[in-house]
Amino acid sequence: MKKLISSLAVCISLSATALTPAYLDDSLPIEDRVEDALSRMTLREKINIIHAQSKFSAPGVPRLGIPEIWCTDGPMGVRPEVLWDEWDQAKWTNDSCTAFPSLTALAATWNPDMAELYGKSIGAEARFRNKSVILGPGINIYRTPLNGRNFEYMGEDPYLISQMVVPYVHGVQSNGVAACVKHFALNNNEVNRHTSNPIVDDRTLYEIYLPGFRAAAQEGEAWSFMGGYNLFRGEHASYNPILMNQILKGEWDWDGAVISDWGAVHDTKTAVSGGLDMEFGSWTNGLTNGQSNAYDNYFLADPYYNGIVDGTYSTDELDDKVRRVLRLTFRTAMDRNRPFGAMGSDEHVAACREVGEEGVVLLQNRGDILPIDLSKVNKIAVIGENAIKMMTVGGGSSSLKARYEVTPLDGLRNRVGDKAEIIYARGYVGDPTGEYNGVVTGQNLDDPRSPEELRDEAIKIARDADVVLFFGGLNKSNHQDCEDTDRESMALPYGQDELIEALAAANPNLCVINISGTGVAMPWTDKVPAIMQAWYLGNETGNALASLLTGDVNPSGKLPYTYYASLDQVGAHKLGEYPGHPGVDELGNEVFDMPYNEGIFVGYRFTDKNKLKPTFPFGHGLSYTTFDYGKASINKTEGTADDTFTVTVPVTNSGNREGKEIVQLYISDLKSSVDRPVKELKGFKKVSLAPGETTDVTFEIKRDALSFFDADRHEWICEPGSFEALVGSSSADIRSKVRFNIKNSK
Ligand code: GLC
């Protein structure tokens, strides 16, 4: 009897297995499941799966039980639900998120562990909200301080970006949610963002603008990319055959899905052949409403379907698109083993605060007026609109409905308690609004007083305080740190410069905490003893800043971009072009041709070459302790390009409190057949040291750290000759260097 039952059980399970279609069988490799699903789909189903059905979703294949793909912004937190076909929020009551620090703050930690923690946390929130794709991270290069979206990106250096984007992507995707790395590529400004046509030579493209994306694709194994709005060599980035077919899917052998930016698709033919896999947001021009529910009219919808039926298009491109969308689906919504995520957990709050505390950069601290010693001060004057203004709302698609936001003033009050008196004055009125897509901060920042009245009040409270903290900078309104607009100058807005000078005259114990996502002009650095670059830090802004200002936490961030004194120090402006000049494309449409005349000389590469002294250099950041560097040594002074050179430098915490130091390695090619930067970042390590502790920091130098991209040969070349490894605390604070020679490899 037993035998009969067990054989019956085997038959049933065999027949069940036989009945389970391969695409639903988790035990099979994804590629087998993709092919099986593809073979079962009708032409209409194939067309449906590659374009949106709503603002942020694509339909999947209901008949086969293949789920929809839901996308959500953004790089710093999970966007509130919007209405099916509107940008406005849907007014759900369960979609408030953890607002994490801006990606510039993350980059400023120079800590890949923080990037992994960040990605894991934000991915868990997207997972909990049942999203398959989170539309981030953004990693476009900081080519100009005027770019309205610099706050969403990771700075000016391709190596730093590469090291930070990979763990971020791994963290996100560990939740079974796809990262969507954006905006591929050359979306380096917001002005004319739909019609900018960057004109970039191949060496600049491969050495500066591609490496972050390449790392995200190859080491990060990102499951999706988002194409940019701009053009490149005559075609829109979102379906650009060079970017998408030749480079991303060809040279980098990437198997993910390319998603258009919202409103970035403009015709069917090139969208079919240009490597685009999913069309979203058409006719919305990114941010304005188009026809409602016009999804069947999308360029990859009926027009494409009809083109296949009438023979205009083969099904080859369609099947490749469908495979990539199915692969994305199997990696996310159809992965039965993916975690369940969480929203607003203590871990996420802790991650938000930790990234914020590690990312803030202490730029200047003359006379060590920071940290504030609460046992010695009785009165703290807090001045500035950015001490009270919530910043998680606004700025474009990265805007959030945060569970809460601790402002700098609240954070200080939480921390200081009754240990000192805190007096606040607004100082200036900048942007009293606080609304985006129907999400409101709930703050009423209206203030009828005149600038003179506001300034007089601020100066008065500053005069008799023991220490003055000025919270200023930018905000998320147009022409500040905001999508779809660029800044109109580097100057701080709202008369802040004059106010800062007046405060410095009223009280020498002044610290300026600049809250912004991009560099600003600081003409008053000689009058202000302490300056802190504080980014948009999300929920825990005030608590993180209070910890740093009172010394509970020792600042350890470093600048991920050059803090220029003026646009004269910026290649994009000195040599042009920015914002480009009017032109027309082959269809007669207006475009803005924008030659990147500075070529590879972006950021410190430009200021080094031209011996310019920025306000603060790339990689700069102070601590409340000090670090001494010993002499760098190298394992050998000669070898071939295939050898590994090992540089070691002892670093000591020579101060009286623990601290973290970001030790940076730059490489100089002392003799080259092409014009190369004075030096380039090719390594960094963040080390934590107790007072008096010394550690040996070691870097391995291989061929890729020595090579330049030869556009004619279309390959990376390491030329024989002399090189120098420079080790330092910033790009302008080199502590030790060591030479080595690459000989001809036979
Ligand atoms: C926007 C942005 C993009 C965002 C998308 C969806 O225009 O450029 O970063 O993810 O549309 O909101």
Image (spheres, grey):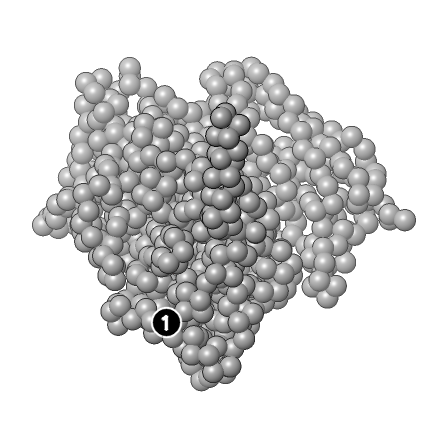
Q: Position of residue 472 (x, y in %)?
A: 29, 43
Ligand 1 closer than 8 Å to label 1 CB: no
Residue 288 shows in the view = yes
Residue 151 shows in the view = no
Density class for disc 1 (Cα within 10 Å; few <14, some 14-19, many ≥20) is many
- Dot 1: element: loop
Q: Quadrant of residue 425?
A: top left
Q: Which residue is more in the foreground, 335 or 244?
A: 335
Q: Position of residue 562 (x, y in %)?
A: 49, 47
Amino acid identity at mark 1: Tyr
Q: Residue at x 65, y 23 (%)?
A: 696
Q: Is residue 371 left or right of residue 656?
A: left
Q: Residue furthest front?
A: 1
Q: Residue at x 64, y 27 (%)?
A: 697
Q: Is residue 484 above or below residue 11?
A: below
Q: Residue at x 74, y 45 (%)?
A: 703
Q: Position of residue 746 (x, y in %)?
A: 90, 49
Which residue is the site of mark 1?
298
Q: Is residue 574 left or right of residue 433?
A: right
Q: Residue at x 26, y 68 (%)?
A: 293
Q: Is residue 305 above or below residue 571?
A: below
